[in-house]
Structures are given as structure tokens and as C-alpha cells.
Image: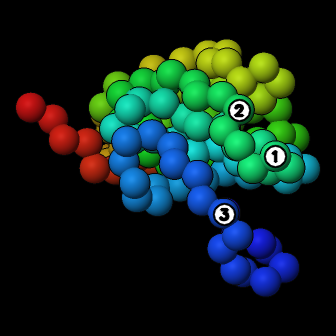
Amino acid sequence: MLKTSSAQQHSALSSGTTQRGVAVAVTPDGRRVYIPNRDSSSVSVIDTARNTIIATIAVGTHPEGIAVTPDGRHVYVPNYCSNSVSVIDTVDNTVADTIPVSDNLWDGSDPGAHTDYPKASFLKGSGCQRG
């Protein structure tokens, strides 16, 4: 964790099994940080005031990328190898919905693939190792 006032590391937390930064999302109030754990197919939730992981949420296979809505009520997580997007409710940190998407959403070859779910159009996964 970094102190934003000084950009200095003041602590460290371990989440998931892949120790590489893929993405993080911070709620607008700054109270929670959501981190996709690619190899454990989960999302860790950090309480920034206590500097602790308060929840680990199971999502689809290989979550990569993450975004929180402007109102802070939902987090969208693209699950690259599941061809889906998990929608997390930030009030109770559970998966509220799973949106199926076409393979074409990920490579951009079909711009109409996500028209039923316009909120998911800004999410893009990468690096699925199939087979």
C-alpha cells in the first residue's frame, strides 16, 4: 500500500496467487480497493482504513482488469477465460450478476458483441491461456 501524500510504501498485503499487478479499482469514497486475482479466480477487497483484506469474492476464470462505477455501487470484472463479466455489489461484496459475453468482446473484432450490456464495453481482458 502506498501513502498517496508521499508516494511511499507503508505496508504490504498479499492477495491471490499471482503476485503481479494486473489492475486495481478504488471506490469513489476511497474506503475500498478491489484487486482481481487472476490465478485464483477471485477478487480481494481491501478496507483502506484498516489496511486489511475484508473479503475474497469468487468470480469467473482469470479475472483481468476491473472498474468501479462512478456511484461506487458496483464493480465490473472481466473474466477472460469464462467469457463473462462479474458484477460485484459493493454493499455486501457479493456477485450480483454474471454477464455472458462473446469471445469477440476481448479482441475487438465484433464491435456489436456487447451492445446488450453497454456498461461492460469499457472492460477488456488479456492473456488467457487456453488448452
**Residue at 81 percent of width and 46 percent of height:** 50
Label 1 packing within 10 angstroms: few (<14), some (14-19), many (20+) = few
Residue 11 is labelled as 3
Q: Secondary structure at mark 2?
A: strand
- Foreground of the two, 5 or 129: 5
Q: Secondary structure at mark 1?
A: loop
Q: Are marks 2 and 1 in contact (CB under 8 Å)?
A: yes
**Residue at 54 percent of width and 18 percent of height:** 98
Q: Can you say which quadrant of the picture contains the N terminus?
A: bottom right
Residue 39 is labelled as none
- State which tag comes first along the sequence, 3 or 2: 3
Residue ranking furthest to the left: 131
Q: Is residue 51 left or right of residue 31?
A: left
- Foreground of the two, 58 or 125: 58
> Spatial distance from mark 3 to mark 1, Cα to Cα?
11 Å
Q: Amino acid at mark 3?
A: Ser
Label 2: which residue? 54
Residue 117 x/y as whole percent: 59, 29
Q: Secondary structure at mark 3?
A: loop
Q: Amino acid at mark 2?
A: Ile
Q: Can you say which quadrant of the picture contains the C terminus?
A: top left
Q: Is residue 81 left or right of residue 36?
A: left
Label 1: which residue? 50
Placement of 75 over or under 26, stated as above or below: above
Q: Is residue 37 left or right of residue 55?
A: left
Q: Amino acid at mark 1?
A: Arg
